[in-house]
Amino acid sequence: MDVDVYYSGQRGGTMPYAALPAFRLFCKKNGFQLKWDSTNKRVDLDPGLKGKVCVLFTGISSGGTAYEWEVLGNVQKFLSDSGMEVVLSQNNTSLAKNTDVAIRFSLKEMRALEKPRLIFFQSEDEKRQDLVKCLRTEMQQSGIPCHYKILKNQKQTSIVHIQLQLPLYTEVNKRKIYAEKIALHLASGVLEYFQNGLHIQPMAFLPPNILKLFYSTMLFPSDKEGQQGADEEPVAEEEPVAEEEAAIQENDQSSMEASESSSEREEQLILAEEELLEQVVSIHPIEEVSEQVELRAAAEVYFDYTLIHSESVEKPYLLIGTLQVKNTGNVELNNPIVCLRVSPVDSIKMGGQVLPPKLVETMAVQGTSGLKGWRYLEDDWFAQAMERGEYWIAPIQPVTIAPESTEAFQNFQISFMKQETGKGIVVEGVVLCNDQTVHFSANNRIAVSF
């Protein structure tokens, strides 16, 4: 009797009932979660981290920076495939009370800093020493120097705070490299923490498609050769010629009888081949594989802009820009939120047809399907922009970007005075879609040097 085996709710195949005890011990040893349904003769397997919860917080500042969202969004993608639940949050620290892992990642830019560095903030009585140790080991492999700061007389918290400190005006491509390294090693540190604490093998973290790939390519490299051997026609052994048959061949009817004998042997060979084929099929059942298209959220984000300036020193430069968002994936992107990150903050003024939330009802453009246009995300948008150098903007009406379609945040205006020699103006962009679960950084940035 065979039993059905399911992994993460998907049927993986069958196994002999007699192998169930050994299979159960194998799963227990490697950290898989196994449930045996004796009524339906079914085994349900789940990743070793199913039921574990990890909360990722952005920086202390309200809303968090776009860079923080980008890093933590990638960490969420890495960890979600391992089976655990990963939650992104801003300042709802109450989520950290009943979670297995709580990490805050923040970004701080410093004018006098020459090289990037990571700071681990720890209280004097740190309850998460094991987690900090694993994160520290992994983060050191990112190539970014790690430092530690002890917080004295601080309220005890279960949140591990890691801050990336960057020199001001760090180039966009370097920012992206740092973001990828930090996300990769941060996720690896969390997995190592669970591996050490729960004694779970990393194999139990892998999703079904990776497990299938691993077993088919690494553990059974000779399967293809074996299958080729099974596909070859079996060679029939030559039967010894009996003396009676030799005598018959000498008779006058030898030609007819030889023909009949040859015909009988051919029929026997065909029957033997059919029996062998039935045995092969019964051992290796052929399953129909339905073609599945992997859902992928992707987008190209880029700036188009025009710079207008006057010869007069007293008049400001005017930058008129558009942020294009092209859906290059195969799923819809809903309600894009745009973050424009500018520096230096005190030298730039934001303008254009972007409305404060309080003025949307009275001043928004009335379209055929209702109000339309763009608005600032928060009522205190100006104060937040002066504090963080970020302008958060959202569409007034619901927006859906279908695959291969493009949506544009058009004609935003940025004005600034001429800067000192050697300094410049920088504008970067990030777009968040689908309830901020996916993040796309602009492929280019606006940079004006003096």
Image (cartoon, rainbow, N blue to C red):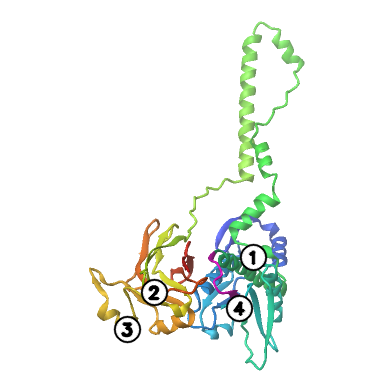
Taking the image as shown, residue 409 lies to the left or right of residue 371, namely: right
Q: Is 409 above or below relative to 110?
A: above
Q: State the CA–CA distance, disc 3 to disc 2.
A: 36 Å
Q: State the CA–CA distance, disc 3 to disc 1.
A: 47 Å
> Which residues are drawn in magenta?
163-172
Classify mark 3: helix, strand or loop.
helix
Rendering quarter of residue 93: bottom right
Sequence order check, earlier mark of 2 and 4:
4
In the image, residue 165 lies in the stretch drawn in magenta: yes
In this rendering, the count of numbered labels is 4
Q: Position of residue 244 (x, y in %)?
A: 74, 15
Q: Camera-side residue: 21 or 292?
A: 292
**Residue plotted at (27% across, 80% down):** 361
Label 2 crowding class (10 Å Cα cut-off): few <14, some 14-19, many 20+?
Answer: few
In the image, residue 67 lies in the stretch drawn in magenta: no
Residue of label 2: 313
Residue of label 4: 112
Tell me the kind of residue under disc 2: Val
